Image (tube, coloured by chain):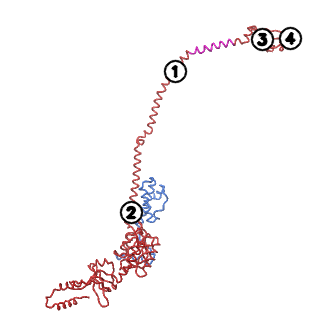
Chain colours: A red, B blue
């Protein structure tokens, strides 16, 4: 470690070498030293022996050492966070940067720009290669990615049962979506067995009747997130039938599991927020459903009311008489016609009758004249035909004593009494003889 | 008069009691009812029946949200749900 006494010693030596020339100020001397130090840019490998990352500090201060030396290092807070690593004492790291000098204390520091775990370069290369391979296989295609179903009610969380991630997820779900049922699938997420455990956990979660799977892990070093860069884990994520929401590490971390999963969130909390609608959202959805339903029914009622009003406005309902009015008027008109028709008809009948009477009176004498003539004729003929008329002409009729007309001599015997009818009376006679007339 | 009786009064088809359905099923059915009501294709009697059913679903869904308590089931690994309570206690 560079100390003030060291610096002063070298300063002394410098002044000996420049004997005779004027002494320079400490500030000038240090800026000379600073300028030459900052030209030395190196990558230093060492084990972290001290580490201080205090909130409010502009920089993170740490020390790396090997067996015989140690070097104080610093890195600006912002840059350290961008690296997304979590350096711990004992880590073997490769620090790239330059030496610098803090003029106020004259203290030398190594200003780090990049901190990597030793061998991380190889690791990153390996992960990058795997990512390329899986991408080429189509495992990261956007059309493979399924959206989170709109109403998730059961969520399986695959993560360490002891980590901060499960706490974050459960607390977030309880706060935002307490109606969600959680299946905890606890698996180790670090160590060489972690990948196969995570695969097992994913398959248990996928077999459950959850609506979505959360694969989460709190922040950690690049190395500690390696199980989520594992090929088997990536394939297990891709094979899940249920949508997988990932929240692995913190914002800048991007694991292969994130790339293969359906929805990528930056943290476990963000994943829990993304997987289920908040109770507030659901409540407003239900409230809006209620008001939409009310409005729809109201609109229906209004439309029917309008239809009814339109019907009610029809003449028939305004003036019920209208319904019978026409008919009544027709009846009136018919009655009127009828009243007028009867006397008219009677008068005309009377006239006809008088006419007929006149005609009949004039016709009647002539009518019977013919009949009278005809009767006279008939009576004359009848008279001609009468036996009495024949007797008048000199004929007579003989009757036996039984009153029967004698038509033959066989009807009488000698001495029978017979009666002879002549035109003006009868003559009683006795048969004295019978003579047959020869034909 | 209960909503179910009203539903059957208006010739509504027999449906499962809303409380026996999952939240999603209830919400799906409710949104279907709203679409049907908004389509204005229904008879008034049918509209009233659907409305009654919708109110039943609404009430049940709201009740489910109001009573919602996080349910945790451990499928794999050792996890103590009480550990969350402890953290919460520490936070509050």
Towards the viewer: B85 or A412: A412
Q: At numbered mark 4, what does the secondary structure look like: helix, strand or loop? A: loop
Q: Are the residues under badges 4 and 3 in a single subunit?
A: yes
Q: Which residue is mark 1?
A: A352
Q: Are the residues under badges 1 and 2 in a single subunit?
A: yes
Q: Which residue is mark 3?
A: A397
Task: Give the Cα distance between marks 1 and 2.
Answer: 96 Å
Residue A98 falls in which quadrant of the image? bottom left
Q: Earlier in the sequence, mark 3 or mark 2?
A: 2
Q: At numbered mark 2, what does the secondary structure look like: helix, strand or loop? A: helix
- Visible in this render: residue B86? no
Asked whether the residues under the numbered discs 1 and 4 touch, taking CB atoms below 8 Å apart as contact, a structural biologist would say: no
Task: Give the Cα distance between marks 3 and 1.
Answer: 61 Å
Q: Earlier in the sequence, mark 1 or mark 2?
A: 2
Q: Which residue is mark 4?
A: A414
In percent of width and height, residue A390 lies at 74, 10
Task: Give the Cα distance between marks 4 and 2.
Answer: 154 Å
The chain ID associated with circle 4 is: A
Packing grade of label 4 (10 A; few <14, some 14-19, many >=20) is: few
Asked whether the residues under the numbered discs 1 and 2 touch, taking CB atoms below 8 Å apart as contact, a structural biologist would say: no
Q: Earlier in the sequence, mark 4 or mark 3?
A: 3
């Amino acid at each position: 470690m560079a100390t003030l006494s060291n610096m002063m010693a070298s300063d002394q030596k410098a002044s000996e070498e420049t004997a005779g020339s004027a002494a320079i100020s400490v500030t000038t001397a240090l800026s000379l030293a600073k300028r030459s130090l900052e030209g030395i840019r190196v990558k230093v490998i060492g084990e972290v022996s001290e580490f201080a990352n205090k909130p409010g500090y502009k920089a993170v201060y740490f020390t790396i050492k090997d067996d015989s030396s140690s070097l104080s290092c610093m890195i600006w807070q912002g840059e350290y966070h961008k690296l997304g690593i979590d350096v711990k004492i004992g880590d073997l790291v490769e620090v790239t940067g330059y030496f610098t000098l803090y003029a106020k204390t004259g203290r030398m520091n190594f200003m780090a720009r990049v901190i990597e775990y030793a061998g991380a370069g190889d690791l990153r290369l390996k992960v990058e290669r795997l990512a390329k391979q899986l991408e080429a296989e189509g495992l990261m295609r956007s059309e493979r990615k399924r959206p989170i179903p709109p109403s998730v009610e059961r969520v399986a969380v695959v993560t360490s049962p002891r980590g901060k991630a499960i706490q974050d997820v459960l607390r977030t779900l309880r706060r935002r979506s307490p109606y969600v049922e959680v299946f905890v699938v606890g698996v180790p997420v670090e160590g060489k067995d972690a990948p196969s455990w995570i695969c097992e956990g994913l398959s248990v979660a996928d077999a459950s009747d959850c609506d979505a799977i959360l694969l989460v892990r709190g922040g950690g070093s690049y190395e500690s997130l390696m199980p989520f860069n594992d090929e088997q884990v990536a394939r297990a994520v891709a094979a899940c039938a249920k949508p997988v929401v990932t929240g692995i590490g913190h914002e800048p971390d991007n694991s292969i599991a994130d790339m293969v999963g359906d929805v990528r969130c930056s943290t476990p909390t963000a994943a829990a927020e993304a997987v289920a609608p908040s109770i507030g959202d659901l409540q407003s959805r239900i409230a809006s459903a209620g008001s939409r339903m009310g409005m729809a029914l109201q609109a229906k009622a209004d439309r029917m009311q309008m239809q009814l009003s339109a019907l009610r406005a029809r003449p028939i309902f305004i003036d019920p008489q209208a319904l019978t009015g026409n008919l009544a008027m027709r009846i009136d008109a018919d009655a009127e016609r009828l009243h007028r028709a009867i006397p008219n008809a009677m008068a005309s009948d009377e006239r006809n009758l008088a006419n007929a009477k006149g005609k009949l009176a004039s016709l009647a004498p002539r009518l019977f004249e013919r009949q009278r003539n005809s009767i006279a004729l008939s009576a004359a003929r009848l008279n001609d035909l009468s036996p009495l008329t024949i007797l008048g002409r000199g004929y007579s009729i003989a009757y036996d004593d039984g009153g029967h007309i004698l038509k033959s001599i066989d009807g009488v015997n000698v001495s029978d009494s017979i009666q002879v009818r002549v035109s003006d009376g009868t003559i009683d006679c006795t048969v004295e003889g019978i003579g047959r007339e020869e034909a | 008069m209960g909503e179910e009786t009203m539903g059957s009064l208006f010739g509504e088809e027999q449906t499962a009691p809303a409380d026996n359905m999952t939240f999603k099923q209830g919400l799906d059915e409710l949104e279907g009812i709203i679409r049907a009501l908004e389509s204005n294709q229904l008879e008034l009697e049918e509209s009233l029946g659907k409305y009654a059913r919708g109110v039943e679903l609404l009430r049940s869904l709201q009740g489910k949200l109001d009573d919602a308590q996080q349910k945790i089931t451990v499928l794999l690994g050792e996890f103590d749900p009480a550990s969350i309570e402890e953290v919460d206690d520490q936070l509050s």
